[in-house]
Amino acid sequence: FDLADRLFQNIGSSWKSASRDNLQDVRELIPEFFYLPEFLENSNSFDLGVKQDGNSVHDVVLPPWAKGDPRRFVRINRQALESEHVSKNLHKWIDLVFGYKQRGREAIKSLNMFVHVTYEGTVDINSIVDPIQRESIIAQIQNFGITPSRLERKPFPSKNVLKPMKDMKSIDFTVLPMLEPMTPPFCIVGCPHVVHMRVVMDDVCKVGMTGQTESAVGDMCLSKGQLVGVGKTCALLPSVKKYYRFGGSNNGISVHVGIASARNWEVNRVLTIHDDMHRAPITAIQPSRDAQWLITGCMDSTVRVWKYKNNHMELQATLCGHDGGKITCVAISTTFGAIITGADDGTVLMWDLRTLSFLRELDHATNIDTRAMPTSVESVSLNDKTGDVLVLVDSKMTIFDINGNLVAAMSSRDTFSAKDRPCCAITTDCPEWMEYGVVAITGHKDGAVLMWCINRDKNELFMRHIIEPKVHECAITCLKIDGKRQDTLLCGDTSGKMSMCKTIQLETLGQKDLATILGEC
């Protein structure tokens, strides 16, 4: 740590110093300003010292518009970075740092001059004989940094800000493909504030049903444009065209052919069997997206972490933390190195995939009567873009960040009866700064499928869209998201029926429907 008065401690004073008061202050924003609010908080209560004015250094002081909330500050800062104004003017900064205004007359005109030893190629350290001078120059470079390599000697062009709407009645379809990366999940490309889904396909689940007492769908994926589903006690491995099956008396799993290929053309054929993976029947499993990891939950409340390699299951760890409750659901993210487990006693635990150790319990029951009987955890899900964790217990959905802080919860106004309550849920990969994006989807007992957004100012989830017409008439048991930009939703129910819904595309609409959508933009 540095002296208290020299530490970064106040956004406002740092801005004034770098932009007006101190010509030697050339600080710029590090990437954390746009995605990591935790770096602005002294959450570990470190003693950072006392300034000369007698005030202690603690959390970073934020601008008034952040309302004391680091998450609000980072979210709005990121929205500003992605705004039209910044897009139009960002090339001016590139000219100063990497371009033609870095050196020479243009640099002088722009007041963009620095100590000569910080420029690339101006000093050959190895040729300096005097050790004192050499150490002095090295110290100068280490303390004040060096200018980056100059990439261009002529002005950078400004970014072409694309706008799909020519006027209120027509749209430029040629720009739509370029707008896809900036469109939130399940929102319409060209009208990012609007969500409209269309059912495009339905089918019946047939894979992994042998020996299953019910017809419920357990997992789904798309293969060459076709729906592929497996039974309730199965989990798909789309990347290797296989599926796991669990719940048998062997306290283990079996690996089957899930999607026909030239090598394995017989669907459902058993490839390998792995016995005695637990001391009791397995009740929940979740493979990682790359199929290298497998998390299994057991009737005896234990969780085990496996690596699937060369047709062998290698035990990595046994995780104990649920106090006697049957494991009902698990989730894994290799991106964030996190495992989430839920049990029928209502506990939700987070584990570190890298160290295979306990991290924290997620407290979703803040407004629930502690004297009431514990309610089973229905679903857990991880956002691979932000690390946010979705938890569904009874009919209440809650979202936490990767550090266990509450992000949003359902409003007390969102009440459901036993006939239409949510029975499964999944989170999208929507970034937190995309305020209009769908962050969660719930499947309900009556077959309804609802899409949810977050009111970040109130930390509340609110219902954004209901998929209609309703295809399913019984409880939804499986929800999966597909598509590069997450615009495809796969649904399965207890009867074995599967459906696929897609976000509508403006270029496929007729004039009447297009006019209706444009009216909502």
Image (spheres, rainbow, N blue to C red):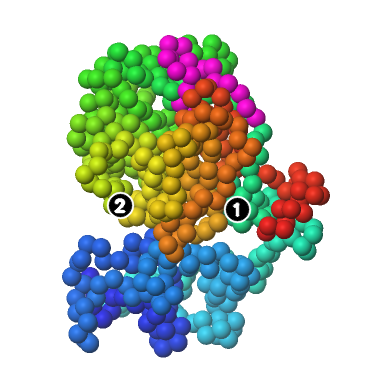
Estimate how packed mark 1 is, as few (under 14), some (14 to 19) or many (20 or more) residues with alpha carbons within 10 Å: many
Which residue is pictured at 67% across the width and 59% down the height?
Answer: 521
Find out whether residue 214 is within the magenta segment: yes
Q: Indicate the secondary structure of the residue bearing disc 2.
A: loop
Q: How far apart are labels 1 and 2 at the CA level?
A: 35 Å
Q: Is residue 331 visible?
A: no
Q: Is residue 402 above or below residue 83?
A: above
In the image, the segment drawn in magenta is 201-221
Q: Quadrant of the N terminus?
A: bottom left
Q: Which mark is residue 367?
A: 2
Q: Secondary structure at mark 1?
A: loop
Question: Percent from the top left, x then y, of residue 462?
Answer: 49, 53
Q: Quadrant of residue 436?
A: bottom right
Residue 163 numbered tag:
none
Q: Residues within 10 Å of mark 2 (few under 14, many from 20)?
A: few
Residue located at (43% from left, 15% from top): 212
What residue type is disc 1 on?
Thr
